[in-house]
Amino acid sequence: MAAGSSRIFVSHLAGVPVFDPNGDQVGRVRDLVVILRVARRPPRLLGLVVELSTRRRIFLPMTRVTGIESGQVITTGVLNVRRFEQRPTERLVFGELLDRRVTLTETDEQVTVLDLSVRQLPARRDWEVDRIFVRKGRKSSAFRRDKGETLTVEWSAVTGFSLEEHGQGAESLLATFEQLRPADLANVLHHLSAKRRAEVAAALDDDRLADVLEELPEDDQIEILGKLKEERAADVLEAMDPDDAADLLSELPERDKERLLSLMEPDDAADMRRLMSYEEHTAGGLMTTEPIVLRPDATVADALARVRNADLSPALAAQVYVCRPPDDTPTGKYLGTVHFQRLLRDPPYTLVSAIIDDDLRPLEPDAELPVVAGFFATYDMVAAPVVDEAGSLLGAVTVDDVLDHMLPEDWRETEFHLDEEADEEAAGHGT
């Protein structure tokens, strides 16, 4: 079955093979990693612990799982082979949650957890635990088999798992602020003590920490990155938007910068070096190297499928860029742009090459910030292509990056985007 099409009981995932898109086996599932949440809310499934043929156990995020079908897991093929290390806020399903004694809230009866089910949330990439398969009666042992009644209940129907609402540890703090947008969580972190800020950063998963770092003032970014283990710091930089990661790397001492680049995947490191070669306040310095690039023979249906990617910001998803091969930046010849609204107006089988907008002249990589800002204001754009002298697409500048560099340096330290409730919570946990 495809990921997210129905409920999956975790017992069915134990030991199943994991394959890349080419059908080559990369390992087997040995556990699932979840993060508990407050107020009996179902845990979020972060990813899988996969054992490679070398016996090394690695972490496979659910964002890199494309399908779970016929007793196998299919991945995007992009794996981080560094050894899995469990974080303070994480729980292992097989190792810590199964065979656990919990209480049914309705009858106050003790039951044993036999299995859990997980599902992908509709229209989202997030997965969560939703139901629990339990057995009533006393816990069985090697000398005694309890054949009590079994039943499946909602996660909220039991106690004994969830975090306490008012705990003071980093684990409970993270759970309390889990629903905050990255910008709001960044504001909370900024006002915590350095010690607590480091604890929370260490407990966040790589993708979440990357999103939060992008919203923090430069000093906080450097402080947090410096307290992470080097390998993890490299992972977090890879998870950040390339332009934001390049800006952060540029602020580090040369020795630290080169060390982190050496630990990154070669393609990611190459993107970082390319971005750092441009002046900061130019189109080249502002751009991301990961816009949506399609070949001329792609269809509207292909474009819309790419636009639906939940990892894309609204600005990057607003348009696609049509180029001759190669598709990766720097691309082959840039042909033009197709705006999202145009994609909605044309039949799915239409070729994108037939509906491109090639009237607007793209930005040059050395175009300075006032020129870039003027381009956005004049043409009411939220993203713009950056093309070199040879006609190759280098990347795209988005309006949020333009605003980021035009606002005062300390604009991130204001609290205009924190609501009163979140502000009060931040004050309560800021010691």
Image: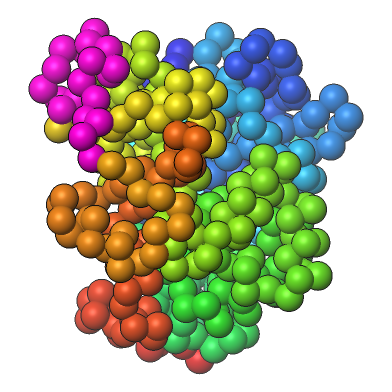
Q: Main secondary structure of the magenta part?
A: loop
Residue 247, magenta (yes or no): no
Q: Is residue 375 above or below residue 319?
A: below
Look at 87% across and 32% down and name the residue there.
Answer: 55
Task: Locate residue 423, reporting x and y percent.
Answer: 30, 82
Q: Is residue 165 left or right of residue 88?
A: left
Task: Locate residue 2, reporting x and y percent.
Answer: 44, 17
Q: Is residue 377 above or below residue 429?
A: above
Q: Between 330 and 215, which is closer to the camera in this rendering?
A: 330
Look at 80% across and 61% down and name the residue there.
Answer: 259
Q: Is residue 275 left or right of residue 424?
A: right
Q: Residue furthest left?
A: 345
Figure colour scheme: rainbow
Task: Locate residue 127, reporting x and y percent.
Answer: 44, 38
Residue 156 in view, yes or no: no
Task: Locate residue 402, reporting x and y percent.
Answer: 33, 64
Look at 60% across and 16% down and name the residue there.
Answer: 21
Count of marks overlaid on the render? 0
Q: Is residue 424 left or right of residue 196?
A: left
Q: Is residue 317 above or below residue 372?
A: above
Residue 353, magenta (yes or no): yes
Residue 304 in view, yes or no: yes
Look at 21% across and 49% down and name the residue there.
Answer: 381
Q: Is residue 202 above or below residue 134?
A: below
Residue interval drawn in magenta: 342-360
Q: Between 275 and 63, which is closer to the camera in this rendering?
A: 275
Q: Residue furthest bottom?
A: 431
Q: Residue furthest front?
A: 389
